[in-house]
Amino acid sequence: MSHGFRSTLLVSALLTALTLAAPPGSAARPAGDPPPATGELDALDGLAAALRSDLHLEQQRLDSACEFTEIRARLIRVRDEAVAAAERLGSLWRGGRLRARGLAMSEVLVYDFAALIYEARRDTALADTLATLEEETRQGSAEARALFRRMVEIHPAAPACLSGTPDEPERGDLAAVRALKRALSIDSVPDSVLVIRGLR
């Protein structure tokens, strides 16, 4: 299933939840109702931008830093904050505070947070797989090859920190790499997706 289709499904689910949760008569409120949530929507808009920036940074780290456990924790934080923000939008909707400009802005934010939730969940799964693969490979586990294949299925492009080749590797490092290559039987894996540092 494509990224765009998954995001559309998630957005549709969020919009449906908001609509079904709206109290009767919410489209035409009397004058004494709570004021529009313009300030809160602006804050949520700022939060969406900040979370997008954080997510982009962690996505870059997945390709450049072998800190998979830490990256996974930060991606979970992004996901949880996006979920909480979507829930807050639902609360504002149920409170009758999304009207006129606020209603239109909230619909844009629903799409933003839905995309953040989807991407953070996807990349959390990738970081978790990489963290497990890194540990299993270090231990020389027989399951490392299966984990490697799972990683490739999720993300065909191997992170640069695992696929990069040192300019002048030590002789001992080369021997260890070759031994690990034999143990994992990955001779047939294309160079573009190798995840053993120093292996060509």
Image (cartoon, helix red, strand yellow):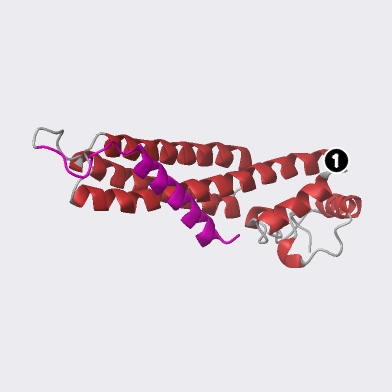
Q: Quadrant of the C terminus?
A: bottom right
> Would residue 137 be visible to someone looking at this image?
yes
Residue 64 location (% of width, % of height): 59, 53
> Would residue 66 be visible to someone looking at this image?
no
> Is residue 103 left or right of 153 when viewed as pictured?
left
**Which span of residues is magenta-colored?**
1-30
The residue at the far left in this view is 31
Which amino acid, by three-letter code, is at mark 1? Answer: Ser
Give the SS element for disc 1. Answer: loop
The residue labelled by disc 1 is: 141
User: Which residue appears at 47% of the width and 57% of the height?
Assistant: 8
Task: Residue 7: say if magenta.
Answer: yes
Residue 134 location (% of width, % of height): 73, 43
Task: Residue 185: say if magenta.
Answer: no
What is the magenta segment's predominant secondary structure? Answer: helix
Residue nearest the viewer, comparing 17 with 131: 17
Residue 77 location (% of width, % of height): 48, 36
| Image height of 110 relative to 69, above or below | below
> Is residue 104 left or right of 131 when viewed as pictured?
left
Within 10 Å of the Cα at label 1, are there few (<14), some (14-19), or many (20+) other Cα atoms?
A: few
| Image height of 52 relative to 157, above or below | above
Residue 7 location (% of width, % of height): 49, 55
Q: Quadrant of the N terminus?
A: bottom right
Q: How many marks?
A: 1
The residue at the far front in this view is 24
> Is residue 13 left or right of 41 when viewed as pictured?
right
**Toward which corner of the image does residue 17 lie, by quadrant?**
top left
User: Which residue appears at 77% of the width and 47% of the height?
Assistant: 147
